[in-house]
Image (spheres, rainbow, N blue to C red):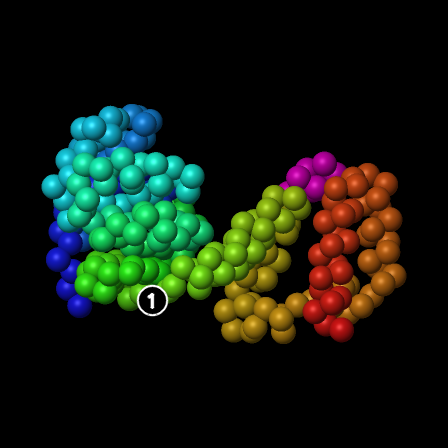
Amino acid sequence: MESSIKKISFIGSGNVATHLAKAFSKKGITIQQIYSQTCDNSEILAWQANSIYICDLDELNLDVDLLIFAVKDEVIKTLSQYILQKKTDIKMVHTSGSVGLDVFENAENTGIFYPLQSFSKTKKIDITAVPFLITSNNDAFKKELIGLSKILSDKVYEYTDEQRRHLHIAAVFVNNFSNHLFAIAQDYCEKHQLDYQLLMPLIHETIHKIDTIPPKDAQTGPARRKDMEIIDKHLYLLKQEDEHLHRIYSLLTDSILKMYK
């Protein structure tokens, strides 16, 4: 399915915009403009994507096939409504996992173009392996978005607002929360003058194991074994030094015990 979208502008110059703009540019899609209030960021991305940067929304050229909002959730509505006042039939999407189509207030040519991945500007990523979740109430526009996403990845799916919101919650658990636990472990090691790098083989094995084994089957540790003696020792130590970590350890232990009743 080939997309008729050949010319795109971005509202935003953060992590998601950086990866998408560079990827589309490499595939021959024209990135017309990059808008950001932070001029330095938009200038850098414009240079990387062979585009033009702007810092004033009134300088946005609306003669494009698609406008992609890759900005914080709370500003999507304000920015999109401002642009829709100037051109009511412009085609636009946002990249948020938790904001619905209603943010565009039922404008005719709107959708959601959500890449299910964690992006950092300086970390290269295989865009062909990224799932793209597409939503639109306009069937013709939805087909265009599906065609556009297939330029970057074969993993393209039609999702409703409700489905995407639930998947976004799951994504927070597997990515944001797990990474936070790694950060907690690193801080804990540094506090006790331990080498955090000794945990890296364990972290890698934990992640690679679930490529072939369901996470529920891969679970190990004292809570999975219901080894209350070790758990109580851990909780006692944590209680003495850090009430916050004690609560986290206790909550996660209770969750594991509940799952394996």
- Residue wearing tag 1: 157
- Residue 220's spot in the image, x, y percent? 69, 67
Q: Which amino acid lies under the numbered mark 1 shown in the image of this protein?
A: Tyr
Q: Which of 91/147 is in front?
A: 91
Residue at left 85%, top 63%? 228
- Reply yes or no: does residue 190 show up in magenta: yes
- Quick one: label 1, few (<14), some, or many (20+) residues within 10 Å? some
Q: Which residues are magenta?
A: 186-194
Please state if 183 lies on the left or on the right of 104 as rendered. Answer: right
Above-or-below relation of 144 to 19: below
- Residue 200's spot in the image, x, y percent? 59, 52
Q: Dividing the image into 4 quarters, which one contains the N terminus? A: bottom left
On the question of residue 148 being in view, the answer is: yes
- Residue 224's spot in the image, x, y percent? 74, 68
Residue at left 18%, top 53%? 27
Please state if 73 lies on the left or on the right of 210 as rendered. Answer: left
Above-or-below relation of 103 to 52: below
Please state if 86 lies on the left or on the right of 45 as rendered. Answer: left
